[in-house]
Amino acid sequence: MTEPGYLSETRAAYDAIAGEFAEWIRDELAAKPLDRAVLAAFAELARGPVADVGCGSGRITAHLRDLGVDAFGVDLSPEMVAVARRTHPGIRFEVGSMTALDLPEGSLGGLVAWYSIIHVPPADLPAVLAGFRRVLAPGGWLQLAFDIGDERLHRDEIGGHRVSLDFHQCRVDGVAALLTEAGFEVRARLERRPDEEGPFPETTPQAFVLARRPQAS
Ligand SMILES: C[S@@+](CC[C@H](N)C(=O)[O-])C[C@H]1O[C@@H](n2cnc3c(N)ncnc32)[C@H](O)[C@@H]1O
């Protein structure tokens, strides 16, 4: 089956910018105490293997491992996976898409999608969330991070590279409703205002939604 055009475009975009993106984002978490708090709570809750889906350079995967989590990474872009493997040689990183996760049903204690569903068109999000639920064990935890808003932002150039990359903002209520429809319990929602100062300024509010596949499901 031919894959949707947006997947090819997203892969090509991150393949083109992989090295620069990894360098640019490297120290971001150190400047975001609330984001670290979200990941710390997730690390305490999730038991068993955790997939960091859309792991990019693997910085969140590595952070979770530092917190004692049995985390591995999956990313659409082979170049991003190559950067992640080079940067974190002791961690497992695989090429794969969240639209067709090559993981056994019920095999994960947790799944993190940290600013990666932002590249999934809204129409495809229900199927992606259903896939997340499928690979989580009953009682398994899902942590999402995304930009809040209603816009689709398109970039055709990043750092001098020609790309075609869409960023989809979401509303927390909308994502929570989709999670519920996909069979998750929404357990926590954090919205924070954009950091307007500091080394990693933001222009939109940021959302962190924690959900769980119910025990009896
Ligand atoms: C904004 S980056 C975030 C990377 C990483 N989570 C972080 O916070 O540093 C988005 C990542 O999601 C990946 N991605 C986009 N669509 C994906 C898909 N369908 N399946 C897996 N990864 C995807 C991209 O290749 C890219 O590495």
Image (tube, grey):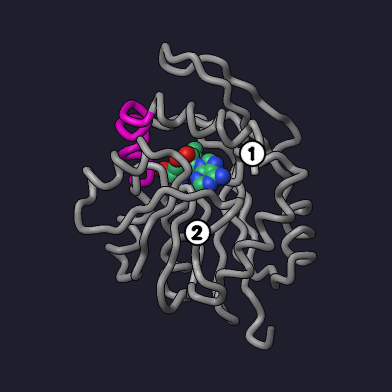
Report the side of 197 relative to 93 (left or right): right
Is residue 46 part of the magenta span, yes or no? no
Tag 1: amino acid: Thr
Q: Position of residue 35 (x, y in %)?
A: 46, 52
In the depicted structure, whether residue 207 falls above or below residue 149:
below
Q: Which residues are magenta?
A: 18-32
> Would residue 96 appear left or right of 2 to someone viewing this image?
left
Q: Residue at x 35, y 69 (%)?
A: 69
| Location of mark 1 (residue) | 2
Q: CA distance from mark 2 to mark 1?
A: 27 Å
Identify which amino acid the numbered label 2 is placed on: Val
* Residue 112, disc: 2
The percent coordinates of residue 7 (x first, y second) are 58, 36
Q: Residue at x 42, y 11 (%)?
A: 160
Q: Secondary structure at mark 1?
A: loop
Is label 2 within 8 A of ligand 1 (CB to nearest ligand atom)?
A: yes
